[in-house]
Image: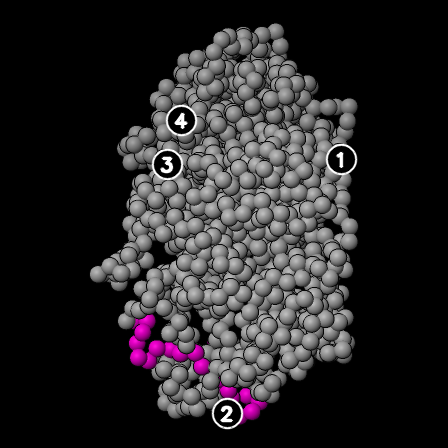
Amino acid sequence: MHDLFAITALGGSSPQTDRVGNVTCTESPGVALASVAARSGQEPKARTALGALIGADAPSVGRFAGNPVMAFWTGPDQWMVAAPFDTHEELAHLANTQLGDTASVCEQTDAWVRFDLDGDDVLAVMELLCVLDCRKMQAGEAARTAIHHLGCFVICRSSGAFSLYGPRSSAGSLHHAIVAAMKSAL
Amino acid sequence: MIINHPLLGSRDSSEFVYLGDASLIDRPDWQAEHAAEAFYDYAYLRDNPAGEHRELWFHEGGDRSWLVVTRNTVTHEISKVELARDVARAQGRSK
Amino acid sequence: MTQINRLSGGQIDRATTLNFRFDNRSYTAHPGDTLASALLANGVRLMGRSFKYHRPRGVLTAGSEEPNAIVELRTGNRQEPNTRATTTEMFDGLEAHSQNRWPSLKFDALAINDQFSKFLSAGFYYKTFMWPAAFWEKLYEPMIRRAAGLGSLSMQEDPDEYDKGFRHCDLLIIGAGPSGLMAALTAGRAGADVILADEDFTLGGRLNSETFSLGDETAANWAGQMVAELSALPNVRLMPRTTVIGAFDHGIYGAVERTGDHLATLPAGKPRQILWRIYSKRALLCAGATERPIAFENNDRPGVMLASALRTYANRFASSAAQRAAIFTNNDDGHRTAADLHAKGVKIVAVVDIRPDAPINYEYEVLAGAQIVDTKGRLGLTFAEVKLSDGSTRTLDCGALGVSGGWNPNVHLTCHQRGRPAWNSDLAAFVPGADLPPGLSVAGAASGLMSTHAALQSGTEEAAQVLELKGSLPDLPDAEDAPVSQTPFWYVQGCARAWLDQQNDVTVKDVKLSHQEGFRSVEHLKRYTTLGMATDQGKTSNMGGLALMAELAGKSIPDTGTTIFRPPYTPVPIGTFAGRMKGQAFHPTRLTPSHYWAKERGAVFVEVGNWLRAQWFPLPGETHWRESVDREVRQTRASVGVCDCTTLGKIDVQGTDAADFLNRIYCNGFAKLAVGKTRYGLMLREDGITMDDGTAGRLAEDHFVVTTTTANAVKVYQHMEFVRQCLFPDMDVQLISTTEAWAQYAVAGPNSRKLLRKIVDPEFDISNEGFPFMACGNITVCGGLRARLFRISFSGELAFEIAVPSRYGDALMRRLMSEGEEFDVVPYGTEALGVMRIEKGHAAGNELNGTTTALNLGMGRMVSKKKDSIGSTLSEREGLNEDDALKMVGIKPVNTGDQITAGGHLMGASGPVDAAHDQGYVTSAAFSPSLDSHIGLGFLKSGDTRLGEKMRLVSPLTDLTVEVEIVSAHFVDPEGERLRA
């Protein structure tokens, strides 16, 4: 076991939580990520193998599926696989083993920062942040969009719960945008 | 503007990056007899129509697909949106 | 001062009194007032001075079309110029100032302009200030700027926040008057997702200004009940205080919501305004109509107003401009105003109706077939002069004069996408044309349906039609359905100084002059006279100007044409367009994983694209950046230094065709690169010019990691996706950016291996034999953490780049520092990095500057002719391969101590210094601590054959001439022995 200490994307030793009104924004470093892109001509096999990894059908356009290892659609025959960091830090290795030569797998864990937004009035915050019609998003939907010029994934866990994945290096800017929107809307 | 992505449906044009004329898909054969002239045309010569225009857009803030968008440059009406990869294949491009 | 012109009734809350100040005097008002209604109630008619002639001006309208009552709102850094008193919602503590006057509103020194109006007529700028040219900047422009114009800026930063947001709906209804409310009810009850936006703070539109009934309710009560029902519908969102400013492509509308303008102080974090982008499947314009004035001599005195505005002030705001009022009208609506004012106790001196068959009234005098021909009153209307039907004149003693010239439908948004309105001769007005923005429909007065009944009916019918509703529609209340007959009457014959555009001071005379001088197209008229070009965009003036112009040209109004309406519908503060994107938040900031560590070390940061990178790390006692940078370079070359290179773009390339793919995007070959090896790659644009460079390491047969320069990472990724998807769609290759995933550090210097040996787990051999120059591979560090190691060198020293998952970057950097203490390790920043790469002769962004080729960079032979790669064909063009092509060289001063300046040009040792004798230029320069001399890199014609030549480095702009010697670009270790050690 190595002895290097991890910091969160916001630079802290523990994740940051902000609460305004009934909405909470939680920095969530406890997730391991790996990208999966089907090899040319191997798409059906890759989908099957991915399904085995997440214990559900490989998600179609704009969807996510699976638990505790889940995957969301990111592009044509491309997905992001996510799992709890504590148990799956080497998720890319696991995915690579399972998918074999049906897909290209790349570690993405620390490419992203995740913020979980929860609370009754979360939609009022979301409409200041992104162009997606979050009011119409249902649990199980995932989309990529631009938030304050940052390419982000928006995951709808339930109607009052969203997860945002943004580029890790801009975590501070994304966090600032989210908290400013919370203070504005709530 | 709204671009009707073939996979994702209506998406705001602010999620996209514009490149230009879709003729950029028709990259010449480097070994053809008049390759130098063909590449010159390919790199520099474009039509600039007032009307229907096929153009390349990249879904940077989305699924990273390149799209061929048929747009009327006068009215901004978008009549067709295709995955550039499908267009390229249909035009015989391969490896 | 008491509210001497306060009437009974109205929609104001008399139980609460608000205090406000105008031009430093205190007044009182009530909730529900606007600044304009409160000033009128307090007996203040004079509210501003005109733009050009500094004429005294009062309020003309009761809405956003106001040209005259333009004030500076608030004080200090919140001061906002050019706000309309007519839409400014009253709050306790409101402070406003009049504009464009000095020293005071009542005595304005520049009112002298009015006496010189002969010289200030249309086009006076073009005629008067032509000569001498030098006077323009120094004299005329400052003079004009001081004299003209409207409000002033605070010159301080606006402390308030503005937001942007996005809303989606099935149906956007613009305007909450009778048609908008009915449409919202129809769509809302049917379950559609509806947004109803209105610029006013009270929804209801004209219904709040009228005394007639809808069914059994007063108009205002009916509107209130509708709003209550709509608020209860979860699928209807009401947006009061929200102006829809533009109709953009594909059903997107811009809307400005004034969330904080009506508050004395904003709660922390709350925005003053929000710019919404509303995505609508369909939209319905219910914007109503605007009354138009009639031009007559001196029609701009405070107290002369639109008749409908006078009615609004009386009915809704319980205020009047004066206790004695006259009406000047060409239609029945003027009589409605007279009746309402009369009922409120305002004395109607007379109704002057141009029509010989004007309706008769027994409670006040109606002068049929008469016209107002002039007015009097220095700072406000006192008398109006009437020419009676028999030709005699009579003077009316009145402080208010309501003018009604008919109504213009508010078609603006229908024209935002090149649409042209159509002429309706029954209304003598323009109505929406056939080519509306796709998805937009129009209802109510905006579509030319002027009665209340017709507005209600069209609201419900249009909503039902656009939503394709089946079944029964909501019942309509009984409402007035008076027929509209408008006899166009634009101006009183014989008038000259009769104002068409009050905000830009354009008179009937100006339009005639413009016609006489040949400016006959409507667009020319507009620009020559500035008619309609003020902040009100001519909402009350365009039609009058157009009608006059048509008459002068002997054409019909529709044949004369209209100017184009453009967004925004009403002025929008720049801050609203900026939103949160200001100051530090102007663009996202990217921080490397060891940013906080660097900050602790006191690093000075520099912006590189969106990244913040440590530029150097000053130590206590160092007073100049050069001291720090020189030390970092010396210590690295002497022992070991560490530099954060996380910001370099990293793209993961996998697939069975990955090597082939790299062969296409790089001009040099990659197919034969062994697994576990890294190679420098040069990327060309299709035109043969260099695009970017970097390295590609082969981690497996089908797996590469490509690096790009920091600045080009995004562009290169796009380009690679373009090549993959559009040019070679059947290649089996997959791409993803991993820039953010890895924290990467360059460890450079003769002791770099010794330092890394303490970090890299023992089972990995990093000796020169086991891990030679350009090797790469997956390793583990610090007891098992997955990491990547590359033996590459930008500094020219024995060097490695080591990468760990980003979350551990901070810890790795700290570990390298503590383990490196015994080697006197030094962290170095981008300056030292730059110095060392110049010393080594490595090209960077300054050399890959969008004009240079591989040949220029001395890498011409790298462009493989055995394979197809982007840019290879056009790189062979004759023009890019001339005998005396620029080649990259090193430059050293002849006299030690002389400085090399980037941007300077290279000229022969003797001979003229001019463009014709230009031989090349310097791209990069630095002081080299290793050579103890300034050095530079640059491009010189046939440079590779001219080493040792003495030249002059010149910069005529900065008067610089330095004697230099052309040398090899490789100042340090030209044989590359160190990096292979």
- Residue A114, x across and y down, in percent: 67, 45
Q: Residue at x 44, y 91 (%)?
A: C948
Residue under circle 2? C894
Q: Is residue A136 magenta?
A: no
- Residue C897, x across and y down, in percent: 57, 89
Secondary structure mostly seen in the magenta stretch = loop
Identify the image quadrant of residue C309.
top right
Type of residue at label 4? Pro
- Identify the chain of the residue marked 4, using the numbered disc in the image: C
Q: Residue at x 59, y 33 (%)?
A: A56
Is residue C31 something one can see in this rendering?
yes
Q: What is the CA distance from the residue labelled 1 to the residue labelled 3?
A: 45 Å
Residue under circle 3? B80
Report if the CB atoms under discs 4 and 3 are less than 8 Å apart.
Answer: no
Label 1: state its secondary structure: loop
- Residue C884, x across and y down, in percent: 33, 80
